[in-house]
Image (cartoon, rainbow, N blue to C red):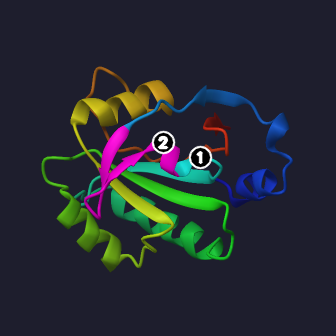
């Protein structure tokens, strides 16, 4: 995701960007163990990604890039970051908490979510329009930018 796109939305100019899809509501578990839904993000721009913590491929790079965005927009109260785990059997809330801590993720701004694989796949494919129903939740090399109303922007 280009930083310029995020800046464009923050400036209130994003209304001209295509609304790709509306994020589907979900109920997952945050690294803290609490329930987390789309309502927890309403009124906020957020950047999302789909990774797993023991990935030997692109996930570490995605997390580093998300950390760069997290740090760059540290003082912007309207921006949140959401990492969805695509390996919920291994990525328990405790594992996600340790991973988030290793990457310096602010628990009030960068959320790490896990839950049933069917729910993660639904969010990824139906809501964010990445991945495929043929492959249960898979990691992606794309960031997804979502506006304050829950619309994926591109």
* 75 versus 121 height, above or below: below
Q: Position of residue 71 (x, y in %)?
A: 57, 76
Would you call the spot at circle 1 few (<14 residues within 10 Å), some (14-19), or many (20 or more)? few
Most extreme residue toward the top, as rendered?
Answer: 134
Q: Is residue 12 above or below residue 7?
A: above
Which residue position is annotated with label 1? 42
Q: Which residues are magenta?
A: 27-40
Picture quarter with the C terminus:
top right
Q: Is residue 132 magenta?
A: no
Give the residue at x 30% y 32%. 119
Give residue 76's quadrant in the image.
bottom right
Farthest residue toward the left? 89
Determine whether, in the image, residue 38 is placed left or right of residue 120.
right
Q: Is residue 80 above or below residue 28?
A: below
Q: Is residue 51 visible?
A: no
**Where's residue 56, x and y in %?**
24, 59
With respect to residue 111, does 154 lie above or below? above
Q: How far across and down, in percent of the image, does residue 51 sit? A: 34, 51
Identify the residue at horizontal 55%, vertical 70% (top origin).
70
Q: CA distance from mark 1 to mark 2?
A: 7 Å
- Label 1 with label 2: CB-CB less than 8 Å: yes
Q: Find disc 2 in the rendering and name its residue.
A: 38
Q: Is residue 32 magenta?
A: yes
Q: Residue at x 34, y 70 (%)?
A: 100
């Amino acid at each position: 995701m280009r930083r310029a796109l995020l800046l464009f939305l923050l400036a209130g100019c994003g209304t001209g960007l295509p609304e790709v899809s509306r994020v589907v509501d979900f109920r997952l578990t945050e690294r803290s163990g609490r329930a987390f839904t789309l309502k927890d993000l309403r009124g906020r721009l957020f950047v999302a990604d789909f990774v797993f913590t023991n990935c030997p491929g692109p996930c570490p790079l995605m997390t580093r890039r998300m950390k760069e965005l997290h740090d760059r927009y540290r003082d912007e109260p309207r921006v949140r970051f959401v990492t969805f785990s695509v390996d919920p059997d291994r990525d328990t809330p405790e594992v996600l908490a340790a991973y988030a801590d290793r990457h310096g993720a602010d628990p009030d701004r960068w959320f790490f979510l896990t839950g049933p694989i069917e729910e993660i796949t639904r969010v990824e494919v139906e809501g964010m329009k990445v991945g495929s129903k043929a492959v249960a939740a898979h990691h992606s090399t794309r960031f997804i930018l979502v506006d304050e109303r829950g619309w994926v922007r591109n």
